[in-house]
Image (cartoon, helix red, strand yellow):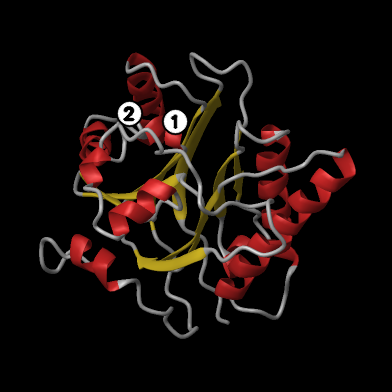
Amino acid sequence: MTEIGSPEIESHGISRAGKVREDNQDAIRFWRPDDLSQKYGPLYGIADGMGGYAHGGVASSLALETFFDTFYKSNGISVPQKLRLGVQNANMGIYQAAQRLGVSRMGTTLTVVNLVGKTLNLVHVGDSRAYLIRDNLATCLTNDHTRVGEMVRMRMLSPEKVRTHAQRSVLEKCLGVGLFVQPDIFHVQVRDGDIIVLCTDGVWSVIEDAEFGRLASSSGGPEDLSRQIYETAMERDSDDNLSIISLYIRRLAADSADPPPAPWPLRFMRRLFARPGEI
């Protein structure tokens, strides 16, 4: 692999309990090591421990710690392999921790992005979300691994009804409750000026997709955007923990000599190609 340099990214994150919950079972994590970012790129991750399971906060923190550690210490494999291995190690770590603690189940969502050259690599399990905001237009990059999300994919429910559905938070897939989990892995071409927002369902459940773009258009940077998103969710009486990571891509690194990543799913590409030539 050739030296690709480091991208210029401004980042900010918020993770708080919110109005209703007594404790915060979400977790966020950034890592931009100077000695590794040139080869593997920075990581930004968010996880939401399930309130219905024991030790949700332990699960979310452990998932991010294990994933990040695996990603940067596993050598000789490709970035997609690192993402998949990180998920499997995090999943097994939580599963084993539950056994040590004597609890029946521990679980968490996990959504992590990694930037190498002009490629945003994304791995996802659960119902936290990642948004790409370009020219003040927001596109959701992730699928919700929930019962309601599956109903939308089967066209049994319109996307507009997801946020108010009684079973919105019933997960079909998460880390920690089984010996194996299959993550979604996407590779998205990004450009200078793009904004990435990661958030837990306590945030997006009360903020429409298009509103993320409007909030970005009035923000002065990642800290301001995170604050605006958080305050909007609080004003709308979100009943869950609230976690946000805002990333402003100021300048991308040069391209790597590695082969291009596998194509992004066609249906997402159609959404991004709403205005021809943007990607």
Is any part of residue 118 visible from this angle? no
Check disc 1 and give the amino acid type.
Gly
Whether 210 is drawn above or below 63: the answer is: above
On residue 158, the disc is: none
Q: The residue under label 2 is which amino acid type?
A: Val
Vertical order, 65 against 272 (above or below) = above
Q: Which mark is residue 202?
A: 1
- Asked if the residue under mark 1 is in contact with the one under mark 2, i.e. CB atoms within 8 Å, the reply is yes
Say left or right for 93 vs 139: right
Residue 174 location (% of width, % of height): 58, 51
Front in this rendered view, residue 118 or 18: 18
Report the disc number at residue 206. Answer: 2
| Quarter containing the N terminus | bottom right
Place residue 163 in its image quadrant.
top left
- In the figure, residue 142 lies in which quadrant? bottom left
Q: Is residue 156 visible?
A: yes
Q: Position of residue 261 (x, y in %)?
A: 43, 78
Under circle 1, the secondary element is helix
Q: Quadrant of residue 254?
A: bottom left
Task: Point out the residue furthest to the left here.
Answer: 275
Q: Residue drawn at (36%, 35%), measured in percent from left and top?
A: 204
Measured Cα–Cα span from mark 2 to mark 1: 7 Å
Tell how many labels: 2
Mark 1 neighbour class, 10 Å CA radius: few under 14, some 14 to 19, many 20 or more? many
Residue 162 location (% of width, % of height): 30, 40
Q: Quadrant of the C terminus?
A: bottom left
